[in-house]
Image (tube, rainbow, N blue to C red):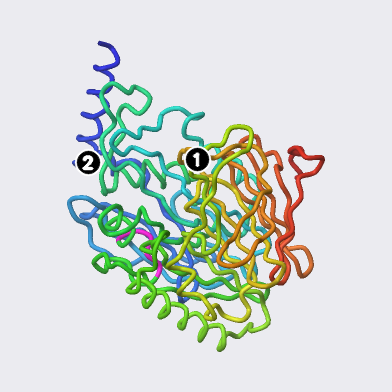
Amino acid sequence: MPRLILSFLGIAVSLISLNGLALAAPLPAWVEYGPHGPELRAVAPAASPCPTALVDGVTAATKEGVAGDADFPKLCRLALKAGQNVAIGNLRLRAPEAPRRIIIIGDTGCRLHGASVQPCNDPKGWPFPKIAKIAAAHAPDLVIHVGDYYYRETPCPITQPLCAGSPSGDHWLTWRADFFDPAAPLLQTTPFVFVRGNHEQCHRGGKGWSRLLEPTSPGTPCRDLSPSFFWSWPTLALATLDSSSAEDREVNSRVVEDLKTQLSTIAEAERTSPNPQQPLFVLTHRPIWALVPVAQLGPFGSLDVAINRTLQAAVRGRLPDGTGMVISGHIHHFAAYDFAGARPAQLVAGEGGDTPEFADLPRFDRTTGNVDGLRPTRLSFARYGYVLMERQGEAWRIEARGLEDEVIAVCTASERRLVCQTPGGAPTKARR
C-alpha cells in the first residue's frame, strides 16, 4: 500500500506541475550550434518577458523565438559569435573559437514505454545525471549529443516505485526530467551540437524537438526531416544528417531521396567552407555502418546483424570527400569500426543512460562481419558511459569512459582511420 500511495502522489505532483508551478523553478538556458553559429536559447513562462543576458559583460536581450502553449514554455533566442562569453541564470560559458576537447553522449533518456520500465529514480538504473556530472568535470569546449533525448512515453506503472512521480508524454515536464535537468552540469558550462534521434520523430517526441532543440528553425511545425547544417572551425568541421526516419532492414526510397538532399547541402557547404582543409565529422543518429547484437549465443558472444540499409544506399558515393568519421548513437553501446581507409570510420556512442541492447555484453567484442560489403576492424562493448575526444596534433584521441570515469578503451582518429586499444585487456584508471 505505501508504494501505491507514493505512486499516486507522484502522479498528482506531476499534474500540478504541468499546470504551471514547475515554471517557478529556475528555467534552463543553453548555447547550441546551428547553421549560423552559436546561439543562446532560454525558456521562459509564456506570460513573462524574455530574459536578458550578459555577453562579454554587456547586457543583451533575448527575443521570443517560439511562443509558449499549454504544453511548453516559450523559447527565447540570441545570436552569438565564436569567442564570446555569455552569462544568464546559472549558465556561464564561452563559445569556442576552436574546440579541442569534446564530449560525445547519446541515447540518454529514461525508458518508460509500455512494459519497458526503467528505474528513473535509481542512479544505478538510470545513470545519465551522473554521466553528465563527471563529463562536465573535464571542462570540455563542446558537447555533441547524437540523439534520443525523449524516452518517457507512457506513465510509470503504479506498481513501480523506482519511477514513481515521473512525467510522461511529449511536453515540457517530460523533456525537463529526461534531459534538461540531468544535463544541467553540461548545459550550464558548455555549448552543444544537437542531433535528432528516432525518439524525436513527429509521432514520438517531435514537438519537444521542434520547439526546443531544432537547430535551424525552432517552432516550425514538426516535419519528418530536419535540415542538415554544416559548421567549421579552423581545426574541425561538423555536419548533421537527419537519419531519424531511416530504416535498417530495407531501403526506404523516399528517405533515401531526403538523405541525398541533405548530403548535397553538406557537400556544397564543405566546398565553400572558409576552412576547407579541416577534417569533417558527419553526425547522424543512426550509424551508417554498424552491427547490432540481436541474440545471445552463450560462450560464443552474440549474434549480430548489420544496419542501416537506407543510409548505406543514400551515402554511397555521396559523402563529402573530407569526411573522416561518422559519429552516431542509436545502438546502446560503444563501438568503433575501422575500414582501413576504404571509407570513413564509424564511431557509436549510445551508452549515455537508456537500457542496453538485450543481447549485448559488457565484455570487449572484436568479432566482425560483412558491413555493406567490407569487413571492418571492430571494438564494441555495452557499459554505461560517455566519450571524451581531444585533439592531439593532427589526430584526435578518443576515450570511452565508464561510470567511475575510468578509461575503458582508447582510440586514435586520423584521416579515415579509427584505431583502438584496450590497455592490458582491461580498463585503465582515469587520466586527468
Q: Give the vertical position of 158 relative to 127 (above or below).
A: above
- In screen coordinates, is 135 left or right of 217? right
Q: In this view, does 276 lie to the left or right of 240?
A: right
Depth-wise, is mark 1 or mark 2 nearer the camera? 1
| Residue designated by label 2 | 18
At label 1, the amino acid type is Ala
Q: What residue type is labelled 2?
A: Leu
Q: Is residue 213 magenta?
A: yes
Q: Is residue 399 left or right of residue 86?
A: right
Q: Which residue lies furthest to the right in this view?
A: 424
Q: How crowded is mark 1: few (under 14 residues within 10 Å), some or many (20 or more)?
A: some
User: Which SS does the magenta portion mostly show?
Assistant: helix
Which residue, given by chain and number where applicable, does mark 1 sit on? 295
Q: Is residue 61 visible?
A: no
Say which quarter of the image contains residue 405. top right
Instruction: From the top left corner, tell me how far across and down residue 52 is, in percent.
Output: 39, 61
Quarter the C terminus occupies: top right
Query: Any mark on residue 79, and which?
Result: none
Residue at x 32%, y 23% (from the top left corner): 160
- Is residue 198 part of the magenta span, yes or no? no
Q: Give whichever of 339, 203 is nearer the camera.
A: 339
**Range drawn in magenta:** 211-215
Mark 1 touching mark 2, by CB under 8 A? no
**What percent of the width, then of the height, locates residue 23?**
28, 44
Work out how far the residue at label 1 is from the one at label 2, CA to CA, in angstroms. Answer: 41 Å
Q: Quadrant of residue 177?
A: top left
Location of the N terminus (image quadrant): top left
